[in-house]
Image (cartoon, grey):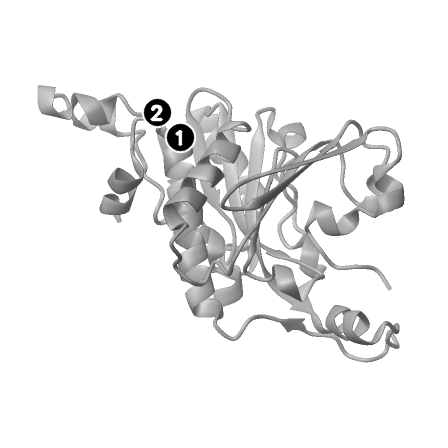
């Protein structure tokens, strides 16, 4: 039975790591950070991940505030800064705000500081600091079932008009290990295929499609029932047994707080002049 996960660390086995072209390093303070670099697309058939960098940050439950929250935010910002290109950035919140496990993207987008318009709107000496910030646009347009339009089509149209230098796409993910539900953040410069972890794959958002870097940011909010049973019993289930997606019981709090952490990290990464206190005071 195929594994359902969006996480590169769950796709990789020890034997694959020993093969040419796959490299793993670890680091981190507030998080345990694992970076996997895949040199080419030769492992697409075996692990389902193509060329790119996949950075996984694992820590305590993101549904709770903790003493390390500021350090977690700053560490996330540092990791993001390594992937984000210079210049204007478009932040896209993927998902359905009406379905709590899928609302991570829209909720994060709502807390990202949009600055693209400031230079035209502000011109006083007191406002020079704001106009010196990087130009950032933010968009969260719902899902295909709500709009009748593929998100990739909308983003392509926005990019034609705004011509950003890069895209940050935030989305809820699926995992195969229940311990990673709501405790893990994955960053990747390989783009994203919305819904792939729950077998509802939409058109991908990637550098191949848009011609500019696409940085994917996500948190696992669901795991499928077959995977849970398989991990607990070590046996494969009959494919005829109905499957379902399972989410933590505190998913509303998890989505709210994880989206805030991600948004704060994005704001700090995009605007190094801002401090954690500045960002927290904005929302």
Quadrant assignment for the N terminus: bottom right
Q: For residue 38, which quarter of the picture? A: top right
Q: In the rendered structure, are the residues bearing label 1 and label 2 in contact, judged by CB atoms less than 8 Å apart? A: yes
Residue at 67% of width from left, 29% of height from top?
208
Which x, y percent locates residue 150?
Answer: 58, 48
Q: CA distance from mark 1 to mark 2?
A: 7 Å
- Residue occupied by mark 1: 270
- Residue 110 shown left or right of residue 195 in the figure: left
Residue at the spot x=74%, y=75% of the render? 243
Between 88 and 46, the residue placed more toward the observer is 46
Residue at 43 percent across and 20 percent down: it is 87
Residue 20 is situated, as x and y percent measured from the top left of the image, at 87, 29
Q: Residue at x 51, y 23 (%)?
A: 85
Residue ID for mark 2: 134
Residue 80 image offset from top left, x and y in percent? 51, 34
**Could you tell me which secondary element the residue under label 1 belongs to?**
helix
Give the quarter of the image for residue 236: bottom right
Residue 280, above or below 43: below
Secondary structure at numbered mark 2: loop
């Amino acid at each position: 039975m195929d594994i359902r996960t969006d996480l590169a660390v769950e796709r990789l086995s020890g034997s694959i790591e020993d093969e040419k072209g796959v490299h793993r390093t670890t680091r981190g303070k507030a998080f345990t950070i694992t970076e996997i670099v895949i040199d080419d697309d030769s492992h697409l058939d075996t692990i389902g991940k193509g060329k790119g960098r996949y950075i996984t940050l694992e820590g305590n439950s993101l549904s709770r505030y903790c003493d390390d929250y500021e350090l977690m935010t700053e560490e996330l910002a540092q990791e993001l800064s390594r992937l984000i290109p210079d210049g204007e950035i478009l932040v896209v919140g993927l998902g359905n705000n009406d379905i709590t496990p899928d609302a991570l993207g829209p909720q994060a987008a709502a807390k990202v500081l949009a600055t693209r318009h400031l230079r035209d709107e502000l011109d006083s000496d007191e406002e020079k600091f704001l106009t010196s910030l990087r130009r950032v646009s933010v968009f969260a347009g719902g899902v295909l079932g709500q709009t009748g339009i593929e998100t990739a089509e909308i983003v392509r149209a926005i990019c034609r008009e705004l011509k950003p230098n890069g895209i940050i796409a935030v989305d809820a993910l699926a995992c195969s290990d229940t311990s990673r539900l709501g405790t893990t953040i994955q960053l990747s410069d390989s783009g994203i295929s919305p819904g792939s972890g729950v077998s509802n794959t939409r058109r991908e958002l990637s550098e191949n499609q848009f011609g500019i870097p696409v940085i994917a940011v996500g948190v696992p909010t669901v795991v499928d029932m077959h995977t849970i049973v398989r991990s607990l019993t070590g046996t494969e289930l009959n494919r005829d047994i109905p499957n379902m997606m399972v989410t933590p019981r505190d998913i509303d709090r998890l989505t709210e707080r994880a989206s805030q952490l991600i948004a704060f990290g994005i704001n700090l990464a995009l605007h190094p002049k801002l401090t954690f206190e500045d960002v927290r005071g904005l929302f």
